[in-house]
Image: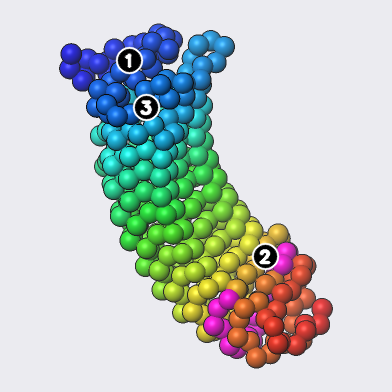
């Protein structure tokens, strides 16, 4: 029987509501290409609803090294967990898979994603963290209803089309090797947090402050030595973290964050407090600990509604 006919048979069972039979066939085909996989654990990981439809499928740490092409017709209304396996690649038509909840591919050995991966639609979170990805395919349609985790890979750059990404939650790009961001990056619309920490970013484009994030923006532990003059135009819904960079100065214009923002500058190498920075508008905390300020201006932070944390040895601020 050809791979195509096997896939069609599984698809027919899914379309007629016979999910238990469909998954049993899939397990047979998974074992055919993964004889060392844990068949019992794979079968036990299935969870069906009251109508015998596949609700969740947990294949966590089942020693799966590859997926048959027929796997791409899988229909799961809830979560699909393929984390901590040995996957080095995904089937070419993996984008056809239908996952209503979370799709977890964390902690595999994925080195690349297929060219049409961006056609994938996931209702919940998409986890691709802690793999071996060095690059991403062009992105025009990728839709993630929840958060997208690309942390802990080896990404050296992002595609120019990355701003087309649709993420309903958070975007995690931390722990990669990014040295720069694509020109259109500021066009991303992120409702939650954006983490770019632990990369190798040296600078940000003047357009970067046009970026809008509903949650925290984490730029800590990069190689930033300066911020663009436009940086004060940035709007962040949560905490702004610039910790552990190589900043020596701050833009002259003041940064105006959102109502519930906190600003974290721990610990950079910034010596002077730039004139005007004191009028920063922070609805939460302002954290300046771990910097090398010789002094801080008094009575210059009227718009900080939360606590102000300052480096040891600096005079106290008057509120």
Q: Position of residue 71 (x, y in %)?
A: 32, 25
Among numbered discs 2 and 3, the one appearing first in the sequence: 3
The image shows residue 113 at horizontal and vertical percentages of 30, 43
Q: Secondary structure at mark 1?
A: helix
Q: Tell me, what colour scheme is on the image?
A: rainbow
- Distance between mark 1 and mark 2 Cα atoms: 53 Å
Asked if residue 63 is positioned above or below residue 240 in the image, the reply reads above
Q: Nearer the viewer, residue 237 or 124?
A: 124
Which picture quadrant has residue 293? bottom right
Q: As drawn, is 191 to the left or to the right of 22? A: right
- Which segment did they paint magenta? 267-285
Q: Secondary structure at mark 3?
A: loop
Where 61 falls versus 35 (above or below)?
A: below
Above or below 161: residue 197: below
Residue 310 x/y as whole percent: 70, 79
Query: How busy is the neighbourhood of tag 3: few (under 14 within 10 Å), some, or many (20 plus)?
Result: some
Q: Position of residue 263 (x, y in %)?
A: 64, 68
Q: Find disc 2 in the rendering and name its residue.
A: 262
Does the magenta-highlighted stretch encompass residue 179? no
- Disc 1 to disc 3, C-alpha distance: 15 Å
Mark 1 or mark 3: name the one nearer the start of the chain: 1
Dot 1 or dot 2, earlier in sequence = 1
Please name the residue that numbered disc 3 is placed on.
38
- The one nearer the camera, 299 or 84, is 84
Q: Which residue is mark 1?
A: 25
């Amino acid at each position: 029987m050809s791979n195509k006919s096997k896939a069609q048979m599984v698809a027919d069972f899914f379309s007629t509501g016979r999910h238990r039979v469909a998954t049993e066939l899939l397990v047979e085909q998974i074992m055919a290409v993964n004889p060392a996989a844990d068949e019992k654990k794979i079968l036990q990981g299935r969870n069906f609803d009251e109508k015998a439809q596949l609700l969740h499928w947990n294949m966590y740490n089942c020693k799966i090294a590859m997926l048959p092409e027929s796997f791409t017709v899988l229909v799961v209304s809830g979560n699909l967990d393929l984390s901590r396996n040995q996957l080095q690649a995904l089937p070419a038509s993996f984008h056809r898979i239908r996952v209503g909840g979370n799709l977890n591919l964390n902690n595999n050995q994925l080195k690349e994603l297929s060219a049409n991966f961006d056609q994938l639609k996931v209702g919940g979170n998409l986890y691709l963290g802690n793999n071996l990805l060095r690059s991403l395919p062009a992105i025009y349609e990728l839709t993630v209803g929840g958060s997208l985790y690309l942390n802990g890979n080896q990404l050296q750059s992002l595609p120019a089309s990355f701003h087309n990404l649709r993420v309903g939650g958070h975007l995690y790009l931390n722990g990669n090797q990014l040295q720069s961001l694509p020109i259109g990056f500021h066009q991303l619309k992120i409702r939650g947090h954006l983490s770019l920490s632990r990369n190798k970013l040296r600078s940000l484009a003047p357009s970067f402050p046009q970026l809008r994030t509903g949650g925290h923006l984490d730029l800590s532990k990069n190689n930033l030595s300066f911020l663009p003059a436009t940086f004060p135009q940035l709007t962040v819904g949560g905490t702004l973290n610039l910790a552990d960079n190589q900043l020596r100065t701050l833009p002259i214009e003041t940064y105006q964050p959102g109502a519930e923002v906190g600003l974290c500058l721990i610990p950079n190498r910034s010596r002077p407090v730039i004139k005007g920075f004191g009028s920063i508008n922070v609805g939460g905390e302002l954290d300046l600990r771990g910097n090398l300020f010789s002094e801080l201006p008094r009575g210059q932070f009227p718009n900080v509604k939360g606590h102000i944390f300052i480096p040891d040895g600096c005079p106290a601020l008057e509120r």
